[in-house]
């Protein structure tokens, strides 16, 4: 169902462009109920200021575009952030790489330690890539991460790949 108001249509467009097909998952990201999100998108209710702030801070949505419909959807026209699938497509190989590199160095990481390492290196990748939205470009950093971890901890390169 299309939104009845221009704001409702833009709210739905954001969710669609960010590839959140499941309204409940996106509502959770906003900290609202699925029903509230549906009401926003249908134009039956307007989100409060805090919800607009989440659109801007978490998803990079330009509030002038969202509220007034002028300008670009995304701040600095970077395009949408990585979709949940693309984000997973980066995080899983990064986690496997870090687990392997540490294991090769004789260090076994528990789940929390691996999560901390993945979070750290994901942050470093995003900084070095200037927050690139191109998954292929981001994947190129994995080799660099491997070399940096090995150098940082004095691990030797593994014999087999």
Image (cartoon, helix red, strand yellow):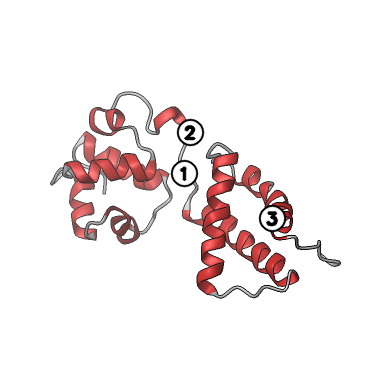
- Point out which mark residue 160 bears: none
* Crowd band around label 1 with a 10 angstrom C-alpha radius: few (<14), some (14–19), many (20+): many
The earlier-in-sequence mark between 3 and 2 is 2
Residue lying at the far top in this picture: please name it. 71
Position of 93 with respect to 4 (left or right) is right
- Residue sitting at 61 percent across and 64 percent down? 95
* Along the line of sight, the residue nearer the viewer: 130 or 153: 153
Which residue bears the numbered disc 2?
A: 78
Position of 116 with respect to 150 (left or right) is left
The earlier-in-sequence mark between 3 and 1 is 1
Residue 81 position, x and y percent, is 46, 44
Label 2: element kind: loop
- Residue sitting at 24 percent across and 59 percent down? 34
Residue 14 position, x and y percent, is 35, 42
- Point out which mark residue 152 bears: 3
Label 3: element kind: helix
Q: Are marks 2 and 1 in contact (CB under 8 Å)?
A: yes
């Amino acid at each position: 169902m299309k939104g009845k108001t221009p704001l409702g249509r833009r709210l739905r467009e954001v969710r669609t462009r960010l590839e959140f097909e499941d309204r409940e998952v996106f509502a959770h990201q906003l900290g609202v109920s699925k029903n509230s999100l549906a009401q926003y998108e249908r134009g039956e209710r307007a989100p409060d200021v805090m919800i607009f702030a989440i659109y801007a801070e978490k998803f990079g949505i330009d509030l002038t575009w969202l509220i007034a419909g002028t300008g670009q959807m995304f701040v600095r026209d970077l395009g949408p952030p990585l979709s949940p699938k693309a984000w997973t497509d980066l995080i899983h190989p990064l986690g496997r790489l870090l687990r392997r590199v540490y294991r090769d160095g004789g260090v076994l990481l528990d789940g929390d330690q691996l999560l901390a390492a993945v979070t750290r290196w994901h942050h470093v990748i995003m900084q070095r890539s200037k927050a690139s939205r191109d998954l292929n470009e981001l994947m190129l950093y994995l080799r660099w991460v491997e070399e940096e971890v090995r150098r940082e901890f004095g691990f030797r390169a593994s014999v087999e790949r």
